[in-house]
Structure formats: C-alpha cells, structure tokens
Image (tube, rainbow, N blue to C red):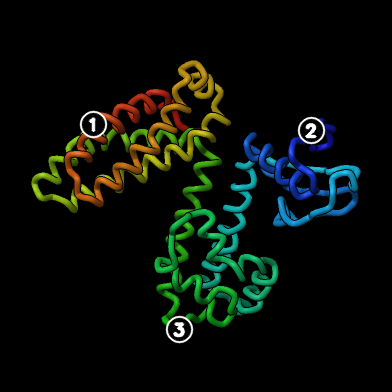
Amino acid sequence: MDGQQIEVTLEDERTVAQVVAAINSWVVDNGMAIAALRVDDRELPLEQIGGHDSRPVDEIGEIHVETRPQWELILSHLELVSGFLQQWHAMLTSPTPDVESNLRLLLEEHRDLARHLQEHVELIFPGSGEAPLSTVYTVTGDPQQMLTPPDGTEPLVRELAALLTLLRQRIDEIRQPSREAAVSSGLIHGMLDEVRDVSILLQTGKDKEAMACVVRFTEVVEKLLRILPHLARTDQAFRQRVEDSAAHGALTEELNEPLRELLEAFHAQDSVSIGDLLEYEIVPRIEKLLALIPAETDG
C-alpha cells in the first residue's frame, strides 16, 4: 500500500472482490480513499472496488493500492466542478467571437461532468433536488442550449452564480478552515439568544420567524461541524485542545441526534419539545463546542 508492504490477516474473505472491499473499508475508516488499484499487473477501475471479481485469492500474487486523504479528493472534486462552471459562466457573461468552439473544447475536456452534472452536484449537496438548478441540468451537454437556453440566458446565469457561490464556500471550508470556523462560530454566538426564544415565538404565533431562526441556526451549525475536521488537520493548537478536552468527538456525535429531533419537533409544531431540545440539549453542547474554536482567522 502506497509503496510499502503491509500484512493483512484474512478472515472470511475468499475472493479478490471480498479482499478489496475489506481493504477499502479499512482505508475509509482511517480517513483515506483509494486513488488507484492494481491486482497483479491489471489496473482496476475505482468504480469496481468491492465489485464482482470472483477470482479466488490464491490465484493472485499482489494487490497494489494507492491512497490519498479523503479531504484532498473532496477538494479536487469541488475544484473540478467549480472550474467547469466558472468557464461556462464566463462564456455567458463575457462572450467572445470563438465562444462556441471554446465551449465545445470545454465539453470535450469534461465529458463526464457534461453528462452527469446533476449527479456530481448532488454528491456535494445531497438532497439539493432538481428544481433550484433545473435550467443548468436541462441544457448541460448541449452546446447550443448552453449558450442560448430556451428561456434566455438570465435564469441560467443566475443559477450558475448561485451554485458557484456555494461551491466556493465549500472550497474555503477546506482551504481556510481557521477563518471559516471563526466566522461560523461568531455567527452562532450571535444567534444563541434568538434561538433560546424560538419556543416563545411559536407560542405567540410567530411561526415563520421561528422557522427562519431554526433553519439559519442548523445550517450554520452543520457548516461548523463540516469545518472541524479540517481545522483539526491544519491547526495544531486546536487539535491539542480537542485531545485534551476529549470533548470534540462526543459533542459532535451527540449534536446530530438532537438536531434531527429538533427538525422533527418543528415539523410536528411541538413547541414544548422544541424549547426543551434547544435549551437543554443543543445550546449547552454548542456552547461547549464554541469554547474550543480559536478566535483568530487565517491571515
């Protein structure tokens, strides 16, 4: 693995597919991802990991595995999608005489993205759905429609700009976690008093205000939770505080269930449960978590 020989004890694995699947599971559990896979001298496509290679293990000599940190692969994917969309957006907003030929070259270079853009975007933003980006998904891959969509360029440019903003935010979370964590922490601090009053808003019939508060709060908390592994990777002092407190893992894991229960209670309009969850389960854990976040930002 990665140029070094490792010893693996087989348990119930009898086929190449079973061994590769077990190796992949071990790699993923250790925060890595398989970047290349070779069985003897045969390169295997990554989509076949754990697939249907039913050859007995004793028929092969070696399995070569190359790995990369998961965050590197995620960042590469984000930048690939963002780069494709940025070039497309630029062609629409600042067209040149050779724009059509340039677009065809772009599509040739990014065939997979052009054919499966919706799948790539939904991998980054699960549950995003088709409606917010319907024009983008409809015209991608057709050079003529990508430049002159049926409903005009304005809706398409608007959708692309919104998606690019979201992608840049995700890229910044990985590239500049200290700054993004400090900003998110500050936003959450500023919302805590309003969050504590959500049940009062519900009891006084201000449902829309309460819902808006809960949505904003959960979105920023989810963003912070995404950033924390990258912050621990880049900030040794933060990583040490986490290790010393032994709080990070427990707090982040314990937050997931109350947040899920909060959304369920809100949809059920259970103001008592909402108030209890926020006051006794979520806000105290959030405050402990915020105490670990460094105030300084990236320079």
Residue where numbered disc 2 is placed: 8
Q: Earlier in the sequence, mark 2 or mark 1?
A: 2
Please tell me which residue is depicted at 52% across the width and 38% down the height of the picture: 176
Res 150 label: 3
Residue positioned most to the top? 244
Q: Dot 1: within a 10 Å radius of its alpha carbon, few (fewer than 14), some, or many (20 or more) residues?
A: some
Residues at marks 2 and 3 touching, judged by CB atoms closer than 8 Å: no
Q: Please state the horizontal and vertical placement of residue 60, each as a whole percent of the image.
A: 89, 46
Please tell me which residue is depicted at 42% across the width and 24% down the height of the picture: 292
Q: Which quarter of the picture shows residue 261?
A: top left
Residue where numbered disc 1 is placed: 279
Q: Nearer the viewer, residue 180 or 213?
A: 213
Residue positioned most to the left? 204
Q: CA distance from mark 2 to mark 3?
A: 57 Å
Amino acid type of the residue that numbered disc 1 sits on in the rendered structure = Glu
Looking at the rendered image, the disc whose residue lies closer to the viewer, 2 or 3, is 2
Q: Earlier in the sequence, mark 3 or mark 1?
A: 3
Q: Please state the horizontal and vertical placement of residue 294, each as a whole percent of the image.
A: 43, 26
Q: CA distance from mark 2 to mark 1?
A: 48 Å
Looking at the rendered image, the disc whose residue lies closer to the viewer, 3 or 1, is 1
Q: Please state the horizontal and vertical placement of residue 6, each as a whole percent of the image.
A: 81, 31
State the SS at label 2.
loop
State the SS at label 1.
helix
Direction from residue 271 to residue 261 in the image, left or right: right
Amino acid type of the residue that numbered disc 3 sits on in the rendered structure = Pro
Direction from residue 256 to residue 204 in the image, left or right: left
